Amino acid sequence: MLYSGIDLHKHSLVIHTVAEDGAVVREAELATARAALTAYFATTIPGPHRAVVECLGSWYWVRDLLGPQGIDLRLGHAKYLKAISYAKVKTDRVDARTLAQLLRVGLIPEAHMVSAEHRELRDLLRARLKLVTRATRARHAVTGLFTQYNVRAAAELPALVQLQVKLLEEEHALLAAQVKRCERELRPRLLPTADVQRLVWIPGIGAVIAYTLVLEIDAVHRFPTARHFHSYCRLVPGADNSGGKTRHKRSRDGNRYLKLAFHHAAVRAIQYVPEIKQEYQRWRRRKGKGIARALVAKELATIVYAVLSKGEAFNGTFKGHVLARTKRSQWPRLASPPA
């Protein structure tokens, strides 16, 4: 078995290859080009080969190129690699050498490599979220101008401020149209799938949230238990235990898109379902609003994990309570009632 560490950059890359015993087989600095990378692995000693590259934004093409060549490519978690491979002298060659040696001894902290079938869909869904964020910002900017001048209509504003409002409204309309365009592309590819069809019956989960869950989770069986899934979704605090003392801490480790999706689903579930609202109010009296909503989100994540891991339909219960209200089968959903 050969082991290669790839230090990848926009214009150049360094590859360091070692054998089972750690002896250097080959090292090269290449241009970031498909032909150069293909030639390197084609001319290296034949046999089983494993490689690792850091989880940066440009690994897609490396995976697509090396997969057909029989190279077992792993994705190194950039954050944890920094902690393991810290060195006083840090160069591209040192980084590639360190990656190769860590891979050889099995110390690479791996990041999940999204499946090829979900990759472009997931990225489009994330792009949709960015468009929604920009559209919301434009709408809030209009509201801010009205507040700044204490008026209720654009006609009451000065001429140049009216121009600002018009531009912001045009921007909002354009972004909203682009959001709808993304949804039209995603709908026929995702809505008919079995996992999405199971998820949309869970309280608070509509089509877009179901798309997010399926694409961001990618493969639920990579989480051995629901607790691991909660941690990945950032629905439980981190731990900072030392000297016999137990402390909780905020942590950004995990998937922020899943955290956002489950919190949105929790808000909708509390609005729609009386049994969930009752549990939320009980938790709120004891722990406060924020923690109560987080507990609802965590319970929804438990339901999602069970539905996806077992491949079964939602059983219509929440914390042991049978839900009296079920969703309508028609699309789109009705407007949300007031919380």
Image (spheres, rainbow, N blue to C red):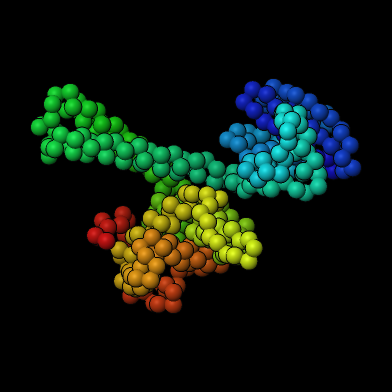
> Would residue 310 appear left or right of 125 to someone viewing this image?
right
The residue furthest left is 156
Q: Nearer the viewer, residue 185 or 263?
A: 263
In this view, 174 is above or below 121? above
Which percent across, then down, holds residue 182? 40, 40
Residue 5 visible to the viewer: no
Residue depicted at x 78% and y 34%? 97
Residue depicted at x 18% and y 38%? 147
Which percent across, then down, holds residue 7? 70, 32
In this view, 16 is above or below 201? above
Residue 29 visible to the viewer: yes
**Residue 282 sits in which quadrant?**
bottom left
Q: Looking at the figure, which quarter contains the C terminus?
A: bottom left
**Residue 47 sits in which quadrant?**
top right
The number of numbered discs placed on residues in the rendered structure image is 0
**Residue 74 sits in which quadrant?**
top right
The residue furthest front is 243
> Would residue 286 appear left or right of 212 to someone viewing this image?
left
Q: Looking at the figure, which quarter contains the N terminus?
A: top right
Q: Nearer the viewer, residue 239 or 214?
A: 239
Which percent across, then down, holds residue 157? 13, 30
Which percent across, then down, holds residue 156? 10, 32
Residue depicted at x 81% and y 44%? 104
Q: Nearer the viewer, residue 233 or 126?
A: 233
